[in-house]
Image: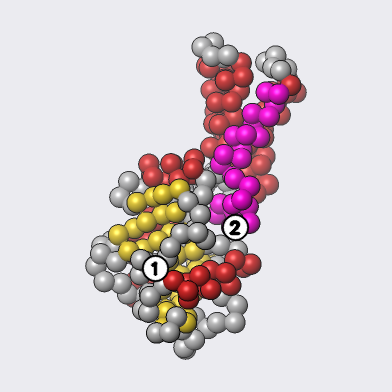
């Protein structure tokens, strides 16, 4: 969201209340609440921090509870939690939260990690597709793939990036061997696991690219300078299934 805080939250809450007001005339109260909560949760995925996402997502149901605008059975208050878990599944919490790739963060990556036309590129944990958009700008001739555990996010990403093949799935269970470049925006705790998976599956010459976090104990073969406070580390696979440890090359 590019509006100053708290305007994004106010807009999301207003949209949820408008949806509820329109739906309550045509649907049972529980259904109207469920769909209105979905509007709030959909708006929450665009916020930059976890506490702001939670505030946006929970604003409508909490205000509904406080105002008593709808008479609902006690079990109906589980509906907002169910909608929240659809977008943020529990088994995805161990990975990175939904942080979009900043526009321009991957500018120049194609010069340091060149790929042949038609190369397969994976955005592992594609969220709403900001990483795919950045990868498309860098590699316009690549075959772009996105993998996202949350099916609502995967659906929204598919609609936003129709030129990419976006699937719902676990990035750690997926096979990375068919990709010439795998892009990640994970957590520091996930990087050792990502490096081990890349070394076990990716072919020599392919690239593991990480935004914001480097692999502990490894020297990147190339690195982009920090953009908006976040650097990009690139690791190239060597023969024998190891990641490069050579001198860092920068633009």
Query: At numbered mark 1, what does the secondary structure look like: helix, strand or loop?
Result: loop
92 lies left or right of 78: left
Q: Viewer-proximal residue, 140 or 81?
A: 81
Residue 82, by quadrant, is top right
Of marks 1 and 2, which one's residue comes earlier in the chain? 2
Q: How many marks?
A: 2
x%, y% of residue 250? 44, 81
- Which mark is on residue 186? none
Query: At numbered mark 2, what does the secondary structure look like: helix, strand or loop?
Result: loop
Residue, disc 2: 95
Check the image and tell me how it is coloured: secondary structure
Measure the C-alpha gap from mark 1 to mark 2.
21 Å
Q: Which residues are magenta?
A: 75-101
x%, y% of residue 28? 58, 14
Q: Can the viewer see residue 154 in this picture?
A: yes
Rendered view: 57 above or below 19: below
Q: Can the viewer see residue 226 in this picture?
A: no
Q: Residue at x 51, y 49 (%)?
A: 149
Residue, disc 1: 177
Rendered view: 80 above or below 158: above
Q: Residue at x 37, y 79 (%)?
A: 204
Image marks 1 and 2: residues in contact by CB distance under 8 Å:
no
């Amino acid at each position: 969201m590019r509006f100053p805080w708290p305007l994004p939250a106010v807009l999301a809450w207003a949209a949820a209340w408008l949806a509820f007001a329109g739906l309550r005339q045509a649907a049972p109260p529980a259904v109207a609440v469920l769909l209105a909560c979905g509007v709030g949760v959909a708006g929450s995925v665009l916020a930059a921090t976890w506490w702001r996402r939670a505030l946006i997502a929970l604003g409508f149901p909490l205000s509904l509870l406080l105002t008593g605008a709808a008479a609902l059975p006690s079990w109906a208050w589980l509906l907002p939690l169910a909608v929240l878990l659809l977008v943020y599944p529990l088994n995805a919490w161990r990975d990175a939260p939904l942080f979009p790739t900043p526009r321009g963060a991957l500018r120049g990556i194609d010069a340091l990690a060149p790929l042949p036309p038609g190369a397969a590129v994976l955005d592992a944990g594609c969220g709403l597709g900001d990483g795919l958009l950045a990868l498309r700008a860098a590699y316009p001739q690549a075959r772009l793939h996105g993998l996202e555990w949350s099916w609502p996010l995967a659906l929204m990403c598919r609609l936003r990036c129709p030129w990419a093949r976006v699937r719902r799935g676990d990035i750690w269970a997926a096979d990375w061997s068919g990709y010439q470049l795998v892009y990640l925006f994970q957590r520091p705790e996930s990087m050792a696991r990502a490096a081990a998976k890349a070394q076990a599956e990716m072919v020599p010459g392919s690239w593991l690219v990480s935004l914001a976090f480097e692999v502990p104990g490894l020297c990147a073969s190339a690195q982009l300078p920090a953009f908006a406070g976040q650097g990009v580390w690139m690791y190239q696979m060597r023969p024998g299934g190891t990641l490069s440890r050579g001198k860092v090359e920068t633009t």
